Image (cartoon, helix red, strand yellow):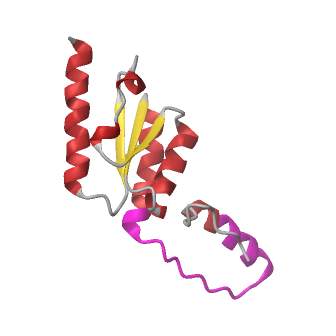
Amino acid sequence: TVPTPEGGTHESGFWAAILKGIRDCVADVAFENTICGPTTRKQTEIVDIAAQNDVVVIIGSRNSANTRRLYELASAKNSRTHWIRSAGELENEWFDGAESVGVGAGASTPDEVTRAVVKCLEKLQGTQKA
């Protein structure tokens, strides 16, 4: 039995390593990947976003395993990663000295919430340049 992380979702690289180890010992192994394509893409993208930006904002519910995993992956690459549920939780000081901000959102995060956060970040960017 492989323990499930607190967030509930292992990244695909984890399973690839486990599967390779098993296939080295057992000739006939069946494995069904139940992580959907969009989730896998979001996880890969958030790692790149975290590496390429000064600050990362992850948007989504605290109860979402998907959002938790995005936060874990981003914060492993970028210590200036913040997890919020809405634009009202953004704090100006998070962006001090930042030239770029990356944004990611959990699969169940409503588009209007994501748009509101991006709009708030754009306004914040305008005030910091003034």
At 40% from the left and 19% from the top, the residue drawn is 96
**Residue 10 sits in which quadrant?**
bottom right
**Residue 98 sits in which quadrant?**
top left
What percent of the width, then of the height, locates residue 42?
40, 56
**Residue 111 sits in which quadrant?**
bottom left
Q: In the picture, which quadrant includes the N terminus?
A: bottom right
Q: Is 123 located above or below residue 2 in the figure?
A: above
What is the residue that sits farthest to the top in this orientation? Answer: 130
Q: Nearer the viewer, residue 11 or 92?
A: 92
Q: Is 82 located above or below residue 60 in the figure?
A: above
Q: In the picture, which quadrant includes the C terminus?
A: top left
Q: How many marks?
A: 0
Q: Nearer the viewer, residue 17 or 63?
A: 63
What is the residue that sits farthest to the right in this orientation? Answer: 25
At 70% from the left and 69% from the top, the residue drawn is 3
Q: Is residue 24 left or right of residue 89?
A: right
What percent of the width, then of the height, locates residue 113?
24, 50
Q: Is residue 76 left or right of residue 120?
A: right
Q: Magenta stretch: residue 46 in it? A: no
Q: Magenta stretch: residue 22 in it? A: yes
Q: Nearer the viewer, residue 65 or 91?
A: 91
Q: Is residue 75 left or right of residue 109?
A: right
Q: Is residue 12 left or right of residue 55?
A: right
What percent of the width, then of the height, locates residue 71?
49, 48
At 45% from the left and 43% from the top, the residue drawn is 48
What percent of the width, then of the height, locates residue 107?
35, 62
At 71% from the left and 72% from the top, the residue drawn is 2
**Which range of residues does the magenta coloring cover?**
16-39
